[in-house]
Image: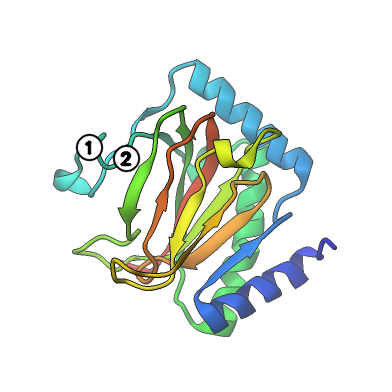
Amino acid sequence: MELAPADLCAALVDELANQGWSIREHFLDPASVEKLAEECRSLWRHDAFHDAGVGQGDALLVRPDIRSDQVLWLDENRLTPPQRRYFERLEALRQAANRELQLGLFDFEGHLAVYPPGSFYGRHLDCFQNSNRRALTCILYLNGDGREEDRGQLRFYLEDGPDSPYFDVAPRGGTLVTFLSDRFYHEVLPARRERLSLTGWFRRRA
């Protein structure tokens, strides 16, 4: 059963409080998800994306041995209507998380991501070594029909060590995966077919 937006945010925040992560289907309505996917594919066809890197600032490097996806960063001041609808839903989540968990979430940075067949992203944390600004990771899947195992599942590790238990998340369109950015290692398994997402992070003040 789909929840109303306010109830959905409340349930998601409860899961963050209890376990530090949440997986919620139907976070965004199917029509908006499809429009976002269409935009992503169109921009991809027009070469608007670039090779993703690791690190930040002067330490930013393109390392295809670590990650081989391509990304397009979004400008919050130039959002399309489908992007704005998603950002409005995220703003409701930000307010709920700050109210209930006192996370101090201030703003959001995000990008569209395309994983062509064969691409992947190795095991990593989403926070940078010299910065703790990224606090909450949000991954919205935009994939349509097809076998889920072909689209680069998210492998989510519950502990830090090399023998950590884990589970895999199918990138089903409309599903939002959220988790504390400095706590959970994760990776994207090699995609056998095109994998689309809108990935971003709520940040604390600098």
Q: Residue at x 25, y 45 (%)?
A: 54
User: Crowding at label 1, few (<14), some or many (≥20) Cα neighbours within 10 Å?
Assistant: few
Quadrant housing residue 32: top right
Reply above or below: 103 against 131: below
Reply above or below: 14 against 2: below
Mark 2 lies on residue:
67
Q: Which residue is drawn at 65% across and 27% down?
A: 38
Residue 145 percent across, percent down from the top left: 71, 34
Q: Which residue is drawn at 43% across and 38% down?
A: 190
User: Crowding at label 2, few (<14), some or many (≥20) Cα neighbours within 10 Å?
Assistant: many
Residue 76 percent across, percent down from the top left: 50, 45
Q: Quadrant of the C terminus?
A: bottom left
Mark 1 lies on residue:
63
Marks 2/1: CA distance?
6 Å
Secondary structure type for disc 1: loop
Quadrant housing residue 120: top left
Q: Residue 175 carries which label?
A: none
